Image (cartoon, grey):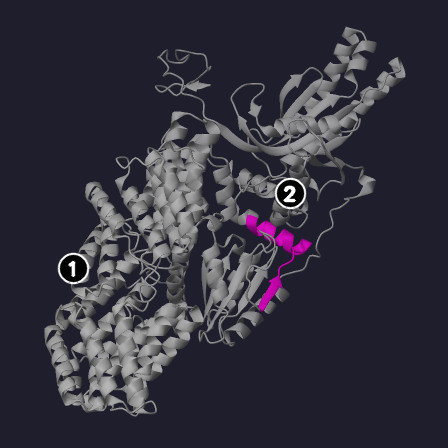
Amino acid sequence: MRPCAQCGGENPSTARFCMSCGGALSPASAPRTTLRFVTVLFGDVAGSTELARGLSPEVWQGTLATYFADVSRAATEQGGRVEKFIGDAVVAVFGVEATHEDDALRAVECARVSLERIARQAAELRRTRGVDFSVRFGIASGQVALSERDSSFAIGEVMNRAARLQAAAPADGVVMDVRTWLLVRGAVPTRPIEPIAAKGFSRPLRAWQLAAAAEGHAGEARTPLVDRRSELDELVTTLRAGLRRPGVPAVVLAGEPGVGKSRLVAEAARRMAPDARFLTLRCRRDGPRLGYWPLYQLAEALGGDVPRGQGPQGKEEIFWTLRELLREAAERRPVVLVLDDCQWMSPAVREFADGLDDPDLDVRAVLMLSGRVDEPPLTRGPVTTLRVPPLGPADTRELAATVAARLGPLPPSDDLARRSAGNPLYLEQLAHLQIDAEGRTDLIAPSAEAAVGARLDQLGVDAQRLLAIAGALGDGCVAGDLEKVAAALDPPLDQTFDETLGQLLGDGLLVTRAGSAGELEVESPVVAEVAYGRLPLADRAHVHAQVADLAEARVDRHPSEIELCALHAGRAHAAWLELRPGGPEERRAAARAARALCAAAQFEVSRGDLSMALQTASQVGRLDSGLPGLELEIAAVETYATAAAGRADETLARIAEARKRWDTGGNLAAAVQLTLNEAVARSTMTGQWHRSLIGQARELAHRADDPAAYARVLLLEGIGHMEDGDYVTAEGVLHEAFGHARRARWCFGATEIYGNLALCLAYGDTPAPAATAICAQLHAELKDAHTVRAAVGCPAALLSDMTCDSAAATNLLDEGRSILAGIGHQPGLAGLDMFRATLAERHGDHGGAGQALERAIRRFDAIGFSAGAQSARLWHATFSGYGPPGAGPRAAQNGDGPPDPGPSAPGPLHSGPPDPGPPDQSPPGAQSADSWDVEVLTEQAAAAAALREGRPDAAAGHVARAGARLVGVHGAGARITPLLVSLRLAVRCGDRGLAERVAGLARADAEVKRDVRALRTIAALL
């Protein structure tokens, strides 16, 4: 029917003018696709060819007419609709006009009643004509697309499945598929039959046959049903005991979806309200495909204000932040941290949860995982597991009555309880469906399809579409975002948005997220899934494209949103690929998805998560994006990762392959990264910087005018100057790199730029007060990038010590130690020990310096960093001429005590920050015997050995040669500490002239650097 826009009168679909007012009718719009979960009944006469041959056409026609009438009447009585007649077959569909929770039962009842009526007809034919007349029925449940046609109005694979099941049924028998069986097994007797090899299906169809009442419900045993009082008591007792244990014990609340876990958690929270606060994170179904995003959701659940990905951060840093947030929350009141739907935990959240198994973690908290648990959700142990069985009949009826009263018109609670057999068994149903899923991940339990679908059918079309959009947006969407996405649909929902939103809020299908500022979420994940499953493919594509755009718009403020953007852009493409493969929409969506995935991979590289970056990059290769420049960007990501892993040969081979399609005019920025990756790979092989390749990259970066590309070129140039001992030039270059990196959305090597710039500020000629101010700015900008903050904090501590601000130096190093120890960053802790030694040396605390160096040696040896261990051993050897540790002069004579010894980051004779991050770091061999710091330390260690042997003249010669090597080092800050070591040794040699010469050099550098602490130490040593 077509409504008239002028008078509202209804008209036939073929009418051009209104039959009521005569006005012209607007052109009919393209009919909308309606998706609905239905049950299909397919009936056919057994042996119809032989029957037709043995009966006259008139008799055969009458026989079929009676058969058709019997089945049609039975279908109508059960609320079904005959879809078509094909020869002697009849197809009826249940759930066309509206979904009912018992559509599958109605279809089975239709088949049973039809067989009873047909049996009477068959008996008459046998008596009067001596022929056997029998009918077979196949029943299948699934989603169809509905049209407005009077016949053949349902399209979908389920129609064919019902036909194939019918063909395998025995005479006067009924065979059903797995979904139908899951929906009816508690109400009708069934028995399994052998899987059916069906034409058009890649694997045999699992099937069940309707059995006689006397056979009972074969294969349908149920877990014993119990009430909830004992489970609640056990849960509360377990949680209270856990809050008294050290660490963060884990409790798993396991059970089937819909079995009552959430109600148990809510009741436990109410009972324990005086003792603990419950904080809940609901895991998303797509969690395993996301990287860092769920961690930020967890931070929000803990009440933290953590910017989503601002600054270069690593996964371990985020874990540390989450532990600190948990500690702060638990200090206010003990916390029960609930991970709901834990079966969908992202790998990152799972890893964080496993890491809470630490008895030294002094937090009054319990981790509770609630969800569908087929296997242990965590690798940690021990874990207390509490299983929630299905409800007993009385509790089922009580719950059904409560649900019916809360949700609105539903079948009587007793009827609902009977049809569910006391348990919705969503998990078991999903498990059954997964057997035949063939990789599909969008399965929904049939009981959820039926129960939620019946509720959704009470809404209008616009309300259903808006609810589906909310489901696609996920938890925490805002009304503004909902409206933007709704306006992009065809037709848009902009005119009815406010009214429709009010209806969903009023019905409780959309709710305000607890503890949020007006954020909305769908009442439950099941409702969201069913609503989304009804959304036509074109609408899905538009929705996901809009959600991707919304996420991308937030990337500048929350960089991790690019992962969400990539996820939804990929889903938009998948929808178009299924709907219109090869069409312009699909091609555009492929390009959009490829760009988003590539950006996500680059973001993950900037965060140092190279494994995730490679996984994301691999998805781009499966898209026909038609963007050749994007291939170079992906090659840049992949070769950055392989170069970081030290796989130089693989890196160079991949770059050579990329060069075959190298169009530098198409993507100069990617060409820059590939050229730099080649330089790093060749440096790995030769131990020398390939400056010619870096020069080529500089020229490309200049033409590209890309800040991220230029920043990385300057980073490698700066590191090259540092390797040459030219910290003054390196400081200027890295300052420029820092400026470019700040203008880029994300930047390969951002971590290294911050760390090495801070080091050059300490080692260069910039006076300590000015350098301290710059380092303080860097340190403040990195409040959420903890590893880099620790790396910057170490040179900042050295600069603070130069200005005699011991308290600031102590705080910076203590903060670095806390961060690096919390993350378990062993390279950083070893480097931090080297800085502890530096400050102790500067204070004349030789015992403290020796202890810090011993810790550094142990750490370097443990991680196999031989160059760092060599430097620490050589430096440690310079103290051996003084007898036992601590025998030297103490810091107190200089007026201010040094920071307490403890672990830290890059050291004074170590040319890079703590584990600056692959692959942009010094090439192997850079700290070999010919590097300036190792040469100086070697001479100083030899001087100490000569002093032990009673050869002061030889020792003086070694000290003089160490000083000569320092002449080639450009950077007052880099020379001061080695000169203090030489001065200490020169004094022990008894060579006053040598001591004065070394003191003069040290004093000159200290005055350039305005290093007050060094001037005091020089005076004390003389």
Quadrant location of residue 469?
top left
Q: Is residue 622 above or below residue 556?
A: above
Mark sitting earlier along the chain (1/2) = 2
Percent across and percent down for residue 1020 are 17, 89
Choose top left, top right, bottom left or bottom right for residue 381. Answer: bottom right
Please provide percent x and percent y for residue 961. Answer: 21, 77
Q: CA distance from mark 1 to mark 2?
A: 62 Å
Q: In front: 718, or 828? A: 718
**Badge 2, how many Cα within 10 Å: few under 14, some, many 20+?**
few
Q: Amino acid at mark 1?
A: Gly
* Location of mark 2 (residue): 435
Question: Observer-nearest residue: 435 or 97?
Answer: 435
Per the rendering, the mark at residue 170 is: none
Whether residue 720 is visible here, answered yes or no, is yes
Residue 108: image quadrant is: top right
| Camera-nearest label, 1 or 2 | 1
- Left or right: residue 398 versus residue 687 is right
Residue at the spot x=43%, y=18% of the render?
2
Task: Please tell me how many numbered marks the rendered image carries.
Answer: 2
Q: Is residue 461 visible?
A: no
Which residue appears at 21% of the width and 56% of the height? 738
Which residues, given as a range, are shown in magenta? 382-403
Identify which residue is drawn at 57% across, 63% down.
252
In the rendered image, residue 950 lying in the magenta stretch gets the answer no
Give the percent coordinates (x, y) of residue 762.
Answer: 20, 70
- Reading the image, the residue beneath label 1 is 732
Please tell me which residue lies in front, 333 or 13. 333
Q: Secondary structure at mark 1?
A: helix
Q: Looking at this view, is 903 or 510 the one in front?
A: 903
